Image: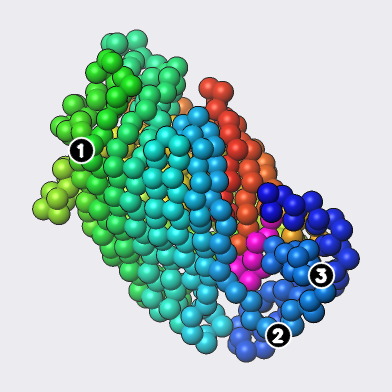
Amino acid sequence: MLLLFLLLCVCSQVYSQVPVPADTLKIDSLNEAHRQVEDLSGQYDIGDLVRAVLFPKRPPVPKNRKSSGIIVVPNIASNPTIGSQIGIKAVAGKKFGNDPNTLLSVGATSASITTKGIIYFYISHNIYTSGNKWNLQGSLVAAKTVTPDYGLGIGKGSDKSETDNILANPGRTPRVLRAQFYNFREKVYKEIKKNLFAGVGVSFDIRRKIDERDTANSLTPYNIYSDRHGFPRDHYMANGLLFNVQYTTRDNQNRAYKGIYADAGFRVNQTWMGSTKSAVQFTTDFRKYVGLSTRNPAHVIAFWNWGSYLVSGAVPYLELPGTAKDPGSRSGRGYTVGYFKGTKYNYSEVEYRFPILRNNFISGVMFFHLQTANDEIGTKLFQEWQPGGGGGLRILFNKVTRTNLCLDYAWGKYGAKGFFLGLNEAF
């Protein structure tokens, strides 16, 4: 309610207290490459609004005062799958060392509980040391989950057998899987050339007490797949080694105005690490940001492609790549997590980002995406596509780190639609 009240006050506060900048960029003379850095004096965020509404007589914050890079917000949501959710979420950003070329380091944590008994806790980080010599990426998750399942593949039916048709689930009839989920992932990258990193890491994915208690028939996509590939129905582990190469020229990790990000690597699940089955997966992640205005760099066209491909072995059903199974769980807005999935999966999205207010306090986005996956009834990768799209608003929470509150409405096929709330951009 406080956030709603503050937003209602924005029209009377924003333009009266913030001058329109003649130019939003200035040159940092310390940077020999003349790298551009933001002038924040003409921007307005939630912190400015809170001070203007709650402390109108307090003197404005001096321009040379260092602002905090920490954001804490309630984590509130409601939908038929999870019930009503309450929790807290925090995001932080900081640059380490004195090298002006050092990329922004970001971290996040969240804890929440829902009326349907879902409990979720995570910590994640993406840290660059001074001069970008090292990059550390990792996360820790502990959760009691309720996962809607819509079958394997991209929604294409089969006339071969009833079992195959149940597995592919062309009508997208939802089932629900409950489980305990634990994940630990850590990757360490070393800069081997300017903007180019090589990395290694580990990932442990553990699910216990997997249960489809609402399903009387044992012929479900999860059970059919698990039986075919030799996974126990009630538990499994997918533990492996990670080998990656990364190239990045993004100017900001939270909301890039320019540059590219590319990461490619192999995940090698090993039974000697406790994995139920061995497997090799190849994953790619490519993002490109094109600025459309030199006067206001917040006008951006962003492109994203993410893919994961099984090379050998077998991957557990709930760990198959698919909708919102990217590292940030932000792909496929309009669909729930894992709505489409397969042993091979590819996702593409384009998004237009634009300011609405001249001080960037409120901005907007429009996006469109396509998904494709294989299945076990003959559908190949890139043979069938499923679209989705939508639009939304951005509220600038912290101008120092470019942290936005993201409010999106998106829709797709099969009547899929929804409202999505998050911190930071989808990509």
Note whether residue 127 is visible: yes
Measuring 56% from the left and 83% from the top, which residue is drawn there?
100
From which residue to which does the magenta span run? 395-402
Which residue corresponds to mark 2?
Answer: 64
- Measured in 3D between alpha carbons, the distance from the residue under mark 3 to the one under mark 1, in whole angstroms, is 57 Å
Q: Look at label 3 and name its amino acid.
A: Pro
Drawn side of residue 282 relative to residue 386, left or right: left
Query: For the residue carrying disc 1, how many other residues have a C-alpha within 10 Å: few (<14), some (14-19), or many (20+)?
Result: some
- Measured in 3D between alpha carbons, the distance from the residue under mark 2 to the one under mark 1, in whole angstroms, is 55 Å
Measuring 58% from the left and 34% from the top, which residue is drawn there?
418
Measuring 72% from the left and 74% from the top, which residue is drawn there?
40
* Magenta segment includes 249: no
Measuring 58% from the left and 30% from the top, which residue is drawn there?
417
Which residue corresponds to mark 3?
Answer: 56
Q: Which corner quadrant of the image does residue 340 belong to?
A: top left
The vertical placement of 169 against 65, above or below, is above
Query: For the residue carrying disc 3, how many other residues have a C-alpha within 10 Å: few (<14), some (14-19), or many (20+)?
Result: few
Which residue corresponds to mark 1?
Answer: 235
Q: Which corner quadrant of the image does residue 21 belong to?
A: bottom right
**Mark 3 or mark 1: whose residue is earlier in sequence:** 3
Of badges 3 and 1, nearer the viewer stands 3
Q: Secondary structure under badge 2?
A: loop
Q: Look at label 1 and name its amino acid.
A: His
Where is residue 31? Give x, y as percent.
61, 86
